[in-house]
Each structure stands twice: as structure tokens, then as C-alpha cells.
Amino acid sequence: MKKWRGLLFILLAAAQLSGCRMYWKHSDANEYYRRGRYPVDGRNFSPVDKYLANQTEPVEDDAEGALNPYVLRVIEAYPKDGSYPYRCIKAPEYDLYLGVTQNLYYKGRILAKAHPNNTRCSYCCGLTFEIFVRAMQLRNMQKGMDPDDFNGMSFYDLFNLLQIWFIEGSGDSPQKGIEYYGLGKKIEDWEEARAGDFMDLSRNNRSGHSVIFIEWVRDDAGKIIGLKYFSSNKSGVGYLTEYFSDSGGKVLRKWIRLARVGSVENYKPFDRLKIPLRRAYAP
């Protein structure tokens, strides 16, 4: 008996020293969840939180007072080495997460859940919406406003905007959502596009992508032949360059939708009765 007790003690000690972790199986997703590589630190900060908290210089407004400089500041905070992975599978996971790297809160409630595997995984529209929310809250805080006041939107208004952003209905897009809620305007002249604008695109292989515009790619004659953007891509969170279908790529020129969130002073009133109500999933 003493021999077995001694062996058990050795095994338990070895498990502790090796940092052994518990795994459990989630039958629906058919995978083992684990504690993430990026837990919060002792101050309850994620890596993105920590980066933003350490920035001592305030964001400088542009001439238009648009959200773009705040969007770019938030983009700076994300690791771009593939350690924030992409995850978007065919089976619905809305009960688990909505494509964001960490829980998003608005008006004291969870607006969008991060995946319980804690790997900081995301997918395209989830990440761009996350950056939108974080940039809006960052701007509000810097201006001495309530962080959770987006043009007077309620929790359910913002959750509806999320679903429009995720294109859960006919004609939906981030562009439409930004317009519906009086936050900004669509950009129709491509020469007016600026880094930090929100965009969704479609390709000739029937796929699409939600991205944050960075810059156009031009040929020697100055013609726009592609674009550089930031999003959650198959290689993880980071920058990517794609080309239009008439320039060796797959992106369709006719299916580019751009929008910009404007200044707080230029917000417009919105009418809930004129905004499509989406109920693709529950909050």
C-alpha cells in the first residue's frame, strides 16, 4: 500500500510540475477545448487591452473628426503574427461565439461573446465589428463621453446593427448599418476612401469578406487594381492585399461597399421603424 501511495504522490507531483492542464470534450464541435494561450493578465487585460491602456498619447482627430484615427489606433493593438487565429466553420456556433476575440459589452450586457476555447479566434465580420465598437468607446472616453453612448443607441439597437453588419438579411452590410443609425455615410467615390473606412467585398468564387480599408493598390498608370485591408483572414488577424478580377485577382469591382463613421457632432437622428429588424440569433 505504501508503495502505491508513493507512486501516486510522484505522479501528482509530476503533473503539477509539468503544468498539466485539464481537457474536456465538446461533443457538438468535436474538439478539445483548453485554456487559452492568451488569458487575461493580473490586471484583467487582454493583449489588446494592455496595448491600448499603455498608450499615453491621445488619438489626434483628423480634419473631418471621423472615427478613422481611432480605428487605426485599435488596429495597432492586435498581434499580427498569426497568434490570433481565424475560426469560421460551417456549423452554426452562434450559441458559442460571434466571431470576436473577447467579449464585447454595451450598456452593461454582453453584446457579442468570444469563443470559450480562449484562443482569441475570430472571423471577418466579428473582428471588424469588434474594432468598430472598441474605436467608438475609445473616442467617447477620450472626449469625456459615456463610452456606451453610440448616438443614443440602446443595447438592442446595437445588437440589431451587429446583425446588419453580419449581413443577416437581404441588402445588409456595414455600410447600411452605419447609415441606418445615423453614424456616418457611404463612400461612393473610391478616391475619397481613407484608411480606417469599413468595407465589405465579394469575389468571383461566391465568397465575401468584411474588412477595414487601408489603401488602394495601383498600377503604373495610377489605375486602382486592388486593395490592402485589415481583417481576420485565414492566416489570422492581420493585413492582406487582394486584386480585382480584371487585374489577376478575384474581387469584384461592382461589389465593393465602403462607409465611414463620421464625427460625433455630425451624428443624425434615426428612426427604428425604418430600420430592418433582424432576429437571426438571440443576444
Image (cartoon, grey):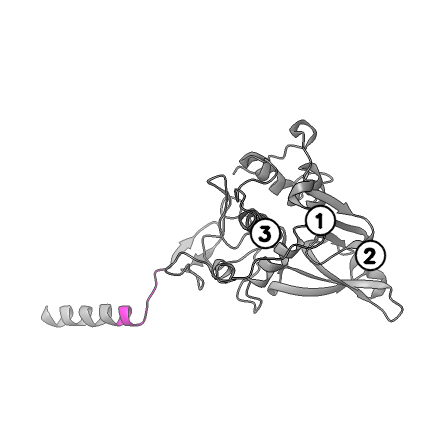
Calculate the distance from the C-alpha at mark 3 to the C-alpha at mark 2: 24 Å
Task: Give the quarter of the image for residue 280.
Answer: top right
Marks 3,2: beta carbons within 8 A: no
* Location of residue 96 in the rendering, given as x and y in whole percent from the top left corner: 49, 47
* Location of residue 123 in the rendering, given as x and y in whole percent from the top left corner: 59, 55
Q: Which mark is residue 191?
A: 2
Q: Judge whether residue 39 can be spotted in this image.
A: yes
Side (left or right) of 95 relative to 270: left
Question: Could you tell which of marks 1 and 2 lies nearer the N-terminus?
Answer: 2
**What residue span does the magenta drawing correspond to?**
14-22
Calculate the distance from the C-alpha at mark 1 to the C-alpha at mark 3: 12 Å
The quarter of the picture where the N terminus appears is bottom left
Question: Could you tell which of marks 3 and 2 lies nearer the N-terminus?
Answer: 3
Q: Amino acid at mark 1?
A: Arg
- Mark 3: secondary structure: helix
Marks 1,3: beta carbons within 8 A: no
Q: Which mark is residue 135?
A: 3
Q: Give the residue displayed 57% in from the left and 48% down from the top.
A: 143
Q: Amino acid at mark 2?
A: Glu
The residue pinned by badge 1 equals 260
